[in-house]
Structure formats: C-alpha cells, structure tokens
Image: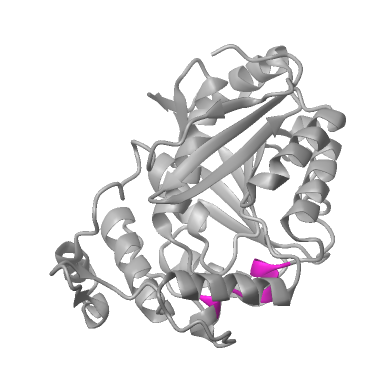
Amino acid sequence: MSRPSRPSASPARTPAAGLHPRNRHRGRYDFAALTAASPALSAFVKASPGCETSIDFSDPAAVRALNRALLKSQYGIAHWDLPDGYLCPPIPGRADYLHGLADLLATSNAGLIPHGGSIRALDIGTGANLIYPLLGHREYGWRFVGTDIDSTALRAAQEIVDANGLRKAIELRHQPDPQRIFAGLLRDDEVFDLTLCNPPFHASAEDAARGSERKWRNLGKPQTLRTDARLNFGGQSTELWCPGGEAAFVRRMIRESAQIASRVCWFSTLIAKSEHLADVRKQLQQGGAQDIREVRMAQGQKQSRFVAWTFLDDTQRDAWRMLRWRDARQSL
C-alpha cells in the first residue's frame, strides 16, 4: 500500500463491514461453551422470548460474568475481575480496535503483521479492566505498557497481571499528572511501535449521566434518570468524562504526541463522536503528521472508528521496520 509523504485533506479510510474477519466474536455467543468454561455465568443466562439464550446486558454483574467467561474460554485468561463501579467493556469491539492496529502495522511492513515481544504498545488509560493489553498480548504476542491516573484501577489491573503470570508481557505505570498524557511516562530513549487509547468522551458528570440515560432508554428500561451503578453501566469519573470531553482530550494527545514524534511509529485513539473528526484531521495536519488514517469499525448497529497518525515519513518508517521488526514473527 502506498503511503502519502504529507497528510491529505481526506485521510485513508477503511470501510466498516461488521466485526473484523479475525475477530473471535463474529458469531453469536455460545453460552453452553461459555458456562462450561465459567460456571458462574449460568446464573445470568436466560431464555429470551425467541427461545434464544442471552443475558441482561443492562446488568453490570451479568456483563462482568460474560467477560470473565469470554476471556477464559477464548484467550486463556484464568483470572479477571474488577472493583465495583469500574468500566466493564464489551470485548468484541475492543478486539476490533486491536485487529485494526495490527493491520495498520502491516501497512508499514509489506503487508505482514509483526508478532511477538519485540512489538511494544502503549495503552493510555488502561483502566482496571486491562482489556487491550490482555487481548493484544494473547492475539499477537505484543508487549504492553498500560498507564492510568487512577491508582485503584492500576492496583486491580496489577492483580490481573500477577494472577495470570503476565509480568514479562504487561507493565503498568501511574501517570501522576491528570493534565498530561505522554509527558513523564516514557523513559530515556524508550520507543513504542504503537499507542492506543479509549478517551473519556463526556465533558462533565451531567453529560455522562445523560448518556447513561440514553443507554437505559435504548434497552427498553424505564426512562427515569437514575444514578446507580446499573444506570452508569460501570465507569469511574476518570473513565467517563474530563473537562472539554473527547475533543479536548484528543487535542492534548495530538500536541503531546508531536513532542515525542520520533519515539513512536504509530499513534492512535478511538473517536466516539464523528463530528470531532474534522477537528482531529486539522490538528494533525497543523501538527506535522506525515500520514493520517481513519479506520471505521462496526458492531451490529453501532458504528465507531479510530484515527491513527505518524510523524515518520516513508524512509523513516522503513528504517524503523528494519531496526525493530526484522526479528518479529510475521503473518498475513
């Protein structure tokens, strides 16, 4: 695939057509197999009016049990749990982001996905659930550094790392300054092949509550605004909102990424709101990004996307590949 040497007004896009072909969760959940792997899930599995088994996806305990079963049966993660009230993510969509990033690395590697521990990824806001490092390591063997400003979340994530014997694959770091993203995290001369992030997209606690009310209403639940954990669907304030919301967070990320331009091959972030894309493109072009990619994803009726960018030109990316990926296992 050719790469533009300068960013264009219309960055490369990948059309959304359902879950990624390599996603393990493309079909319906096999609840018989999942409950066999994790018997605790059976307490939440019920027959729907159409005689199909499912769970109540508005119940955080049920979603947590489902995630635990998926991680155990599909990824070999024997222990996974969250403190009460922390974000419990949908695994299929999170897996799609990682598969999209693997494809992105392949565009800088003659179409081959580099596997193994020589590939290092930086997960910004890894959270208590640690979902991206767990999936990324199991799928591609990459090593991860997960960062967060929430010490409680990092302690929970470290318990997952330790219980599953993943200390060599996943390192956790605390970001003490909530106004910084990359600053103060990278060690001297440390480099990463990619970064990823699921930014807080609400601008305030009130905005987050309204978003939860919409979710509740879409699930056919009573429309009265509620503030308990069932309404919030899990998530601490640092996971759900920040001043200025997603737009401000990503602007800050872009500014800081330019300060470490030569130390990362590909930066990336999820963008929840499509109306933010034009500003993201503008900020990246003004910041000197050499290549900008917008990759669309879909899960059922839900549409999402991530944006990736690099400050390295073609020659620099080729040199990066030869230096860092030559010993990595490669696959289509």
Q: Tell me the quadrant of the picture where the C terminus can be found.
A: top left
Q: In the image, 26: left or right of 61?
A: left
Query: Residue 114's spot in the image, x, y percent?
Result: 48, 29
Residue at 63% x, 74% y is: 210
Q: Is residue 193 visible?
A: no
Q: Is residue 279 magenta?
A: no
Q: In the image, 321: left or right of 98?
A: right
Residue at 75% x, 71% y is: 204
Q: Is residue 30 visible?
A: yes
Residue at 35% x, 77% y is: 62
Q: How many marks?
A: 0
Q: Is residue 235 magenta?
A: yes
Q: Is residue 5 above or below residue 74?
A: above
| Colouring convention used in this rendered image of the protein | one colour
The answer to which image quadrant residue 232 occupies is: bottom right
Q: Is residue 213 above or below residue 193?
A: below
Query: Residue 134's spot in the image, x, y percent?
Result: 46, 55
Query: Residue 47's spot in the image, x, y percent?
Result: 17, 75
Residue nearest the viewer, comparing 27 with 36: 27
Q: Is residue 92 above or below residue 44?
A: above
Q: In the image, 270: left or right of 25?
A: right
Q: Is residue 205 above or below residue 32?
A: below
Query: Residue 127's spot in the image, x, y percent?
Result: 59, 65
The answer to which image quadrant residue 294 occupies is: top right
> What range of the chain is rendered magenta?
232-241
